[in-house]
Amino acid sequence: MADQDKTINNTPVSTGEKPVAETFAPREASRFVWLAIVSIIFTIAAWIAGSYSATAAIVTSAAAIITGALALKSHRHGVRNTAITSIIAAAVLLVVISAFCIVIYVGLGSL
């Protein structure tokens, strides 16, 4: 109901409706945004390091997964989507390089 409908001759009329207090959600810390950005940077660094060193790529992708997991606590969809994308990309690299190293070391060790 509009405010003008609640008055008769400039006197307020009770409609039985309680006034709704405006509630504001608490501001979210900006650290989640930075954690998602750091996770993306670690993921990119892990993919680059994968060309040079398998252990560096594994360690860096694990760090990207951890920082991405910490960024998932955010309430903003963009931050969570960025963190999820980073986690998936880092996990794919981690699985591929780990499997490659296991096959190489176990395969060559049995010969």
Image (cartoon, rainbow, N blue to C red):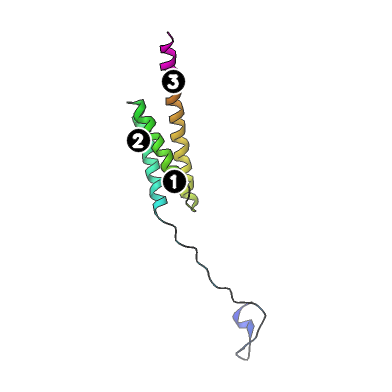
* Location of the N terminus (image quadrant): bottom right
Q: Is residue 55 left or right of residue 96?
A: left
Between disc 2 and disc 1, the foreground one is 1
Q: Amino acid at mark 2?
A: Ala
Residue of label 2: 45
The image shows residue 101 at horizontal and vertical percentages of 41, 21
Q: Amino acid at mark 3?
A: Ile
* Location of the C terminus (image quadrant): top left
Discs 2, 1 touching: Cβ within 8 Å:
no
Residue farthest to the left, as pictured: 52
Q: CA distance from mark 3 to mark 2?
A: 22 Å
Q: Earlier in the sequence, mark 3 or mark 1?
A: 1
> Which residue appears at 61% of the width and 83% of the height?
4
Depth check, front residue: 85 or 108: 108
* Magenta segment: 101-111
Q: CA distance from mark 3 to mark 1?
A: 29 Å
Disc 3 is placed on an element classified as helix
Q: Earlier in the sequence, mark 3 or mark 2?
A: 2
Residue of label 1: 70
